[in-house]
Image (cartoon, helix red, strand yellow):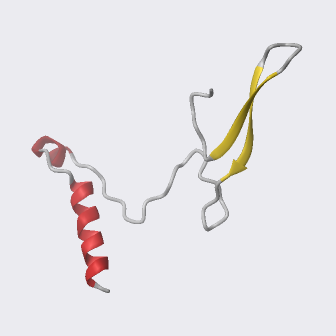
Amino acid sequence: MPARIRSVRSRSFLLPNSSIRVVLSTMASFQPNGRTYDGAGIVPDVLVPRTIASLAAGVDTQMLEALRYLRARLGAR
């Protein structure tokens, strides 16, 4: 199995004459803009960088922003 998993479904095959294992993609996932997720992952809707101060204080700024974002979206309905 490859060390780096990508946004594809894959199948592993053992070549009978050489006993070499190969992995071939059988499906790919695409973003709405048509680009694949490979190599970059999913781009966040809201970027919340971590800071040294928040890490030192034990504050999860990313979780707090996610909760604020969701509450704002749910409150708008």
Residue 10 pos. (x, y %): 69, 39
Residue 15 pos. (x, y %): 83, 20
Farthest residue toward the top? Answer: 18
Could you tell whether 36 is left or right of 20 in the image? left
Residue 66 image-quadrant placement: bottom left
Residue at image coords 37%, 64%:
46
Farthest residue toward the left? Answer: 57
Residue 3 image-quadrant placement: top right
Q: If the image is split into quadrants, where does the C terminus sit?
A: bottom left
Farthest residue toward the bottom? Answer: 77
How many badges with numbers are in the image? Answer: 0
Could you tell whether 72 is left or right of 35 in the image? left
Q: Is residue 23 above or below residue 53?
A: above
Could you tell whether 19 is left or right of 1 in the image? right
Residue 74 pos. (x, y %): 29, 78
Residue at image coords 15%, 50%:
59
Say which of 23 and 44 sits in front. 23
Q: If the image is split into quadrants, where does the N terminus sit?
A: top right
Q: Is residue 43 above or below residue 77?
A: above
Residue at image coords 89%, 14%:
17
Residue at image coords 15%, 47%:
53
Could you tell whether 18 is left or right of 4 in the image? right
Q: Is residue 65 above or below residue 54?
A: below
Residue 64 pos. (x, y %): 21, 60
Say which of 4 and 18 sits in front. 18
Q: Is residue 1 above or below residue 77?
A: above
